[in-house]
Amino acid sequence: MKNIVLIGMPGCGKSTLGRCLAERLGRDFIDADPEIEKDSGKTIPELFAVSEDFFRKQETRTTKRLSALQDKVLAMGGGVVLRQENIISLKENGLIIFLDRSPEDIIGDVDTKTRPLLAAGRRRIYDLYAQREALYRAVADVTVQNKGSMQDVLLRLVDAARVLQQRNNL
Ligand SMILES: Nc1ncnc2c1ncn2[C@@H]1O[C@H](COP(=O)(O)OP(=O)(O)O)[C@@H](O)[C@H]1O
Ligand SMILES: O=C(O)C1=C[C@@H](OP(=O)(O)O)[C@@H](O)[C@H](O)C1
Ligand SMILES: [Mg+2]
């Protein structure tokens, strides 16, 4: 079966809800950020300290490796949509869900320490959302709103994943 791939803003809930979604679907969960760290032997802040482009190159390398897997739930980094080659790889063997959470809600609980792009301040989230929202929507097979309790959002994600799988099997 194709992978279920979560995309969306940093802090939108991909890692947390992705792990729960995988459990509910009986699949393995893989978070891209720690995989990038393993593949490169550097932390995300260390990669960004070289340059954002350097991080993006490592991200593409790891995205290609993860895209070749099957049956997984993948939580990608928020910027994976910035390179078209990443999306082409992910779509070969994956169904993409945009987890859409408002900047207001993200700012409430995002951890900026491990997210170099947000080190300049939480308001950076508004700029990133404005830059990326259309891109996330365009590349996704479906959008799920992250609004309300985690339990409700998880149910919506499980439904969306099942509908995508069924549609793909037709
Ligand atoms: N609907 C929600 N209600 C409350 N907290 C949420 C909700 N969605 C996400 N969170 C919280 O937001 C934070 C960021 O989520 P995370 O999964 O790390 O995001 P991402 O992997 O997309 O960057 C976590 O502390 C998570 O528990
Ligand atoms: O939005 C981005 O460009 C990034 C998001 C991060 O992942 P999360 O979306 O899991 O925070 C991480 O890949 C890196 O800091 C860059
Ligand atoms: Mg994450």
Image (cartoon, rainbow, N blue to C red):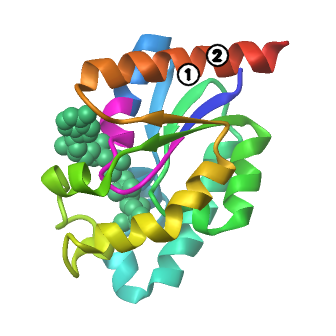
At which x and y percent is residue 134?
Answer: 58, 59
Q: Residue 163 carries which label?
A: 2
Residue numbers of the magenta segment:
6-17
Magenta-drawn stretch contains 34? no
Q: Residue at x 45, y 56 (%)?
A: 77
Tell me if the residue at label 1 has its CB under 8 Å from ligand 1: no
- Residue 124, placed above or below residue 87: below
Residue kind at label 1, given as amino acid type: Ala
At which x and y percent is residue 83?
Answer: 65, 68
Q: What element carries label 1?
A: helix
At which x and y percent is residue 60?
Answer: 62, 64
- Residue 138 placement, left or right of 98: right
Q: State whether residue 63 appears in this view.
A: yes
Residue placed farthest to the right in the image?
A: 170
Q: Residue at x 57, y 21 (%)?
A: 161
- Residue 99, placed above or below residue 3: below
